[in-house]
Image (spheres, rainbow, N blue to C red):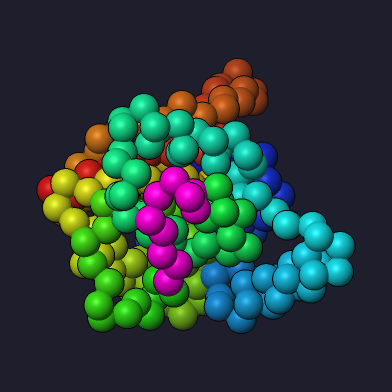
Amino acid sequence: MSAGADGGGAAAALSREGSPVKDGFVPSALGTREHWDAVYERELQTFQEYGDTGEVWFGEESMNRLIKWMQKHKIPLDASVLDIGTGNGVFLVELVGTFSVHVEDFLNLSTKLSGFHICIDKGTFDAISLNPDNAVEKRKQYVKSLSSVLRVKGFFLITSCNWTKEELLNEFSEGFELFEELPTPKFSFGGRSGNSVAALVFQKS
């Protein structure tokens, strides 16, 4: 499983914390709702006091990469976009005014949610993979929820610092097909090279 991050300290923390084991990673507090509730409560206080918007997951380069992909493929301006695990909302702010966006707790989705043109994940699947309470089942629930809200032929854009391209293809093999692999920064170590993150576009079949 890949290590490192595309800029963004929080994403790097996920990668360092989760060591690969059979069927996933060593459980971590980074995979719990309580941890992220506390993180974003602190970020909210910081924003209110100092105007600091907080961490940009995987860095601005990753955020711009996704927006450029949507522009390249001429995604309609009225397309509905679900930002999965929106965190502090920095990416969401970039989308507002361009697309119709909706924020939702992905493990407790509203029953009425469906028909999204695009679903975007920048680190949420990574975090769920570290959940101490049956992460394997949580990952299956994630894929099931994704399938239920994304319309047929809709796109799922995922950026991950913990999973390789091949592993993500396996995780989303049921009901999704690889549409495109997005370019990401490369690194070299010990004579070997690889990508610091995986960024893939799936299409619901």
Q: Where is residue 175 in the image (x, y as percent from the top left)?
A: 16, 53
Evaluate whether residue 4 shows in this view. no
Asked whether 6 or 139 is in front, the reply is 6
Taking the image as shown, residue 180 lies to the left or right of residue 61, namely left
Q: Position of residue 181 (x, y in %)?
A: 36, 31
Residue 100 included in the magenta stretch of the image: yes
| Residue located at (38% from left, 80% from top) | 108
The mark tally for this picture is 0
Outermost residue to the right: 50
Residue 119 included in the magenta stretch of the image: no
| Residue located at (68% from left, 46% from top) | 8
Res. 151 image quadrant: bottom left
Taking the image as shown, residue 111 lies to the left or right of residue 161, namely left
Taking the image as shown, residue 188 lies to the left or right of residue 1, namely right
Taking the image as shown, residue 99 lies to the left or right of residue 87, namely left
Asked whether 57 or 72 is in front, the reply is 72
Evaluate whether residue 186 shows in this view. yes
| Residue located at (61% from left, 50% from top) | 57
Asked whether 169 or 112 is in front, the reply is 112
Q: Position of residue 112 (x, y in %)?
A: 25, 77
Looking at the rendering, the stretch of residues picked out in magenta corresponds to 95-104
